[in-house]
Image (cartoon, rainbow, N blue to C red):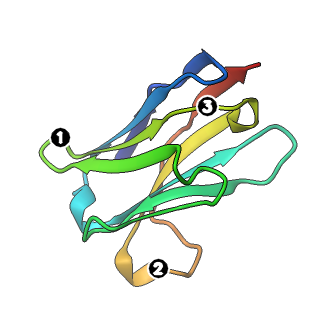
Amino acid sequence: QVQLDESGGGLVQAGGSLRLSCAASGLTFSRYITDWFRQAPGKEREFVASIRSSGGSYYADSVKGRFTISRDNAKNTVYLQMNSLKPEDTAVYYCAAQDPLLINTGRYNYWGQGTQVTVSS
């Protein structure tokens, strides 16, 4: 059974940092594309960052230069380091794993349960 477990969310002041983790069981992250999404109250879910099986990374313009996605293959965990946090970064953050064959389809094989990030002004 595949499971993605996010952790690391919490309450932080503007300008602070958090590191989110997404630990996988039942699949090998290095064989998948792993994306982070977020959803704020009353808003649609939005893409945040992606790491490809090759290790290449991509970011939404809103987080570029502040967030860094990385993967530890030995721990089978993907991280999202979030620096210079802003109140508008407040959302539930989700990780999702996508078979490379599904790239650009909008379809994902697995989702985590989400972790809340709240940035106070």
Give the foreground label among 3 and 2.
Answer: 3
Residue at x 58%, y 40% (from the top left corner):
93
Query: Is residue 117 placed above or below 65 in the rendered structure?
Result: above
Q: Earlier in the sequence, mark 3 or mark 2?
A: 3
Label drawn at residue 12: none
Q: Position of residue 34 (x, y in %)?
A: 40, 59
Q: Residues within 10 Å of mark 1 (few under 14, many from 20)?
A: few
Mark yes or no: residue 1 visible. no
Label 3 sits on a secondary structure element that is: loop
Q: Name the kind of residue labelled 1 in the image.
A: Lys
Q: Earlier in the sequence, mark 3 or mark 1?
A: 1
Residue highlighted by disc 2: 103
Q: Nearer the viewer, residue 116 or 51?
A: 51
Residue at x 62%, y 28% (from the top left corner):
117
Q: Earlier in the sequence, mark 2 or mark 1?
A: 1
Residue highlighted by disc 3: 85
Q: Residues within 10 Å of mark 2 (few under 14, many from 20)?
A: few
Q: Position of residue 5 (x, y in %)?
A: 40, 36
Residue at x 59%, y 74% (from the top left corner):
106
Query: Is residue 87 placed above or below 95 in the rendered structure?
Result: above
Left or right position of 69 against 90 = left
Work out how far the residue at label 2 is from the one at label 1, CA to CA, in angstroms.
24 Å
The furthest residue to the left:
74
Label drawn at residue 75: 1
Q: Name the kind of residue labelled 3 in the image.
A: Leu
Q: Position of residue 119 (x, y in %)?
A: 68, 23
Mark yes or no: residue 107 visible. yes
